[in-house]
Image (spheres, grey):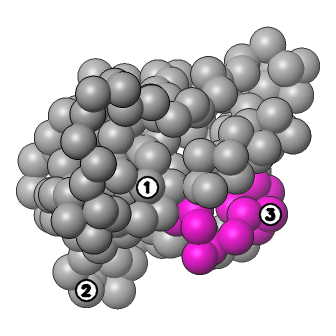
Amino acid sequence: MGALQRGLLATGLWKPDVPVATPAPADAPIVPTGGAAYPHNLPLLTLDGKHANLSDLKGKVVFVNLWASWCPPCVAEMPGIHALYKKMDPKKVAFVMISLDENPAKAQAMLKRQGYTFPVYFPAGPLTPPFDSNSIPSTVILGPDGQVAARHDGMAEYDTPEFKAALEKLAR
């Protein structure tokens, strides 16, 4: 089933919306980058059990993907996400792959088997909007200020020149 879904992704029919920066209104006050509050306090655990928080990534574009090892569409889109991850500048774009597996060992085994090196986390509490999707896979792209630049529920092919260029533009 996964191979079939991966083949379907290769057709290009499942493309996510390209992320775009939301321009501030002309009359909005100018706030220095360091002064604005980051809108997402999302506690996470790393693969090795260390605490992390999405707010630690303020200032970077953040690619957040919710997935599980038992979800065939999630597994089907992972090669493309990993390929995109390897092409992006980690100083500007962060990847947060949030596993919803109840058993972290299953997620870790799948990641090791496939050779994926992107950062994987587990929720350390309830998921808050905009991450509390009713379906997986689900992807949310945050701008450097934490504002949602794009969201896609369902599988998609992210390793495209257009999507990479949009992330790079958002990261400027």
> What's the distance in space between the residues labelled 1 and 3, CA to CA?
19 Å
Q: Could you say which disc has been placed on residue 50 in the image? A: 2
Q: Residue 74 vs residue 101: left or right?
A: right
Q: Any mark on residue 161, and which?
A: none
Q: Element type at marker 2?
A: loop
Q: Position of residue 131 (x, y in %)?
A: 28, 38
Q: Earlier in the sequence, mark 2 or mark 1?
A: 2
Q: Compare residues 118 and 39 and report the one nearer the observer.
A: 39
Q: Secondary structure at mark 3?
A: helix
Q: Which residues are magenta?
A: 83-96
Task: Where is residue 72? Give x, y as percent.
Answer: 58, 34
Q: Is residue 117 visible?
A: yes
Identify the secondary structure beneath mark 1: loop
Relative side of 169 to 36, left or right: right
The residue that mark 3 highlights is 87
Q: Nearer the viewer, mark 2 or mark 3?
A: 3
- Quadrant of the image containing the N terminus: top right
Nearer-N-terminus badge (2/3): 2
- Tell which tag, 2 or 1, sits nearer the viewer: 1
- Is residue 120 within the magenta segment? no
Disc tally is: 3
Residue located 34% across and 77% down the image: 46
Q: Amino acid at mark 1?
A: Pro
Whether label 2 touches label 1, CB < 8 Å: no
